[in-house]
Image: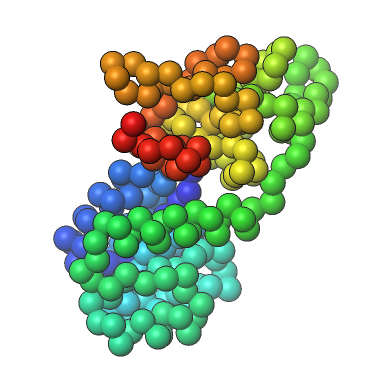
Amino acid sequence: MFTCMVVDDEELARERLTRLIAQRGNWKLVAEADSYQEARTLLLEKRPQVCFMDVEIIGGSGINLATELSSELNTRWVFTTAYSQHAHKAFEIEADDYLLKPFDDERFERILEKLQRKLILSTPNRDILAVRTNGHVQFIKTRDIIWIKGAGNYLELHCQNRTYLHRESMTGIEQHLDPSSFIRIHRSAIVNINYLDAINSELGRYSTLEMSNKDEVRIGNTYRKPLFQMLGLDAGE
């Protein structure tokens, strides 16, 4: 899951962005702010991966705030503005993109997809997981994992002949798995598509994946579109 923050002094603009983010199952809004000082405090506290920042906010400039904090934070910036002349300022500080108000949902979706690719590519993949079990450490090759299930503070790592219990969050492990093989299909499930056998339907709608070990994993509605895109299928099928 990717974390983001919204900074805008217009309540309606904030509400729209937070609503669009909430519709994406792999994005989490960690904070929102309407002023320079509040935004500065929350950015340093929450350290989001992405910040949607209005160019002009109460008490100062969003661009100046991003410039001030860029050396302290590993945050990607997307500036929002109603004035196209501000766009060049955004790119002067190497912002990832900007949203010119009013923007449509498709434009926002394209930005999120671009950000996801950048975030995934900038995070090193793990080839081996160290799993503590029965007083020793078991080393598991990530390519041998068929699917992963969230179980409270732990993860169930389902392999061909055994399931391991590993203490880590879904968010943490997701960012270190090879995105060409692993994809999150539910709030509590990640699958390795190399072990995908079939997609099963329920009431005329594809709803579960059947894995090579015969486990069935349910597809969450908010994760359906990126999964079907990865598989080269029509999400409406």
Q: Relative to the observer, which residue lies in front, 116 or 237? A: 237
Question: Along the line of sight, which residue is nearer the eye, 192 or 152?
Answer: 192
| Residue under the image location 34 percent in, 16 percent down | 202
* Residue in the picture at 55% in, 14% down: 215
The quadrant where residue 41 appears: bottom left
Residue at 45% x, 43% y is 229
Q: Residue 110, how many percent across, how many down?
A: 38, 59
Answer whether residue 153 is visible to the viewer in this image. no
Asked where in the image residue 111 lies, by quadrant, the reply is bottom left
Residue closer to the observer: 170 or 190:
190
Residue 134 shown left or right of residue 76 in the figure? right
Vertical order, 211 against 118 (above or below): above
Left/right of residue 127 with respect to residue 87 in the rendered view: right
Q: Tell me how many marks there are.
A: 0
Image colouring: rainbow
Residue furthest right as drawn = 136
Q: Position of residue 217 (x, y in %)?
A: 48, 20
- Quadrant location of the C terminus in the rendered image: top left
In percent of the image, x 28 and y 83: which residue is there?
84
Compared with residue 100, is residue 165 higher up or lower down, i.e. above or below?
above
Position above or below: 187 against 70: above
Q: Position of residue 222 (x, y in %)?
A: 35, 37
Res 232 seen here: yes
- The front one of 64 and 171 is 171
Q: Position of residue 72 (x, y in %)?
A: 57, 69
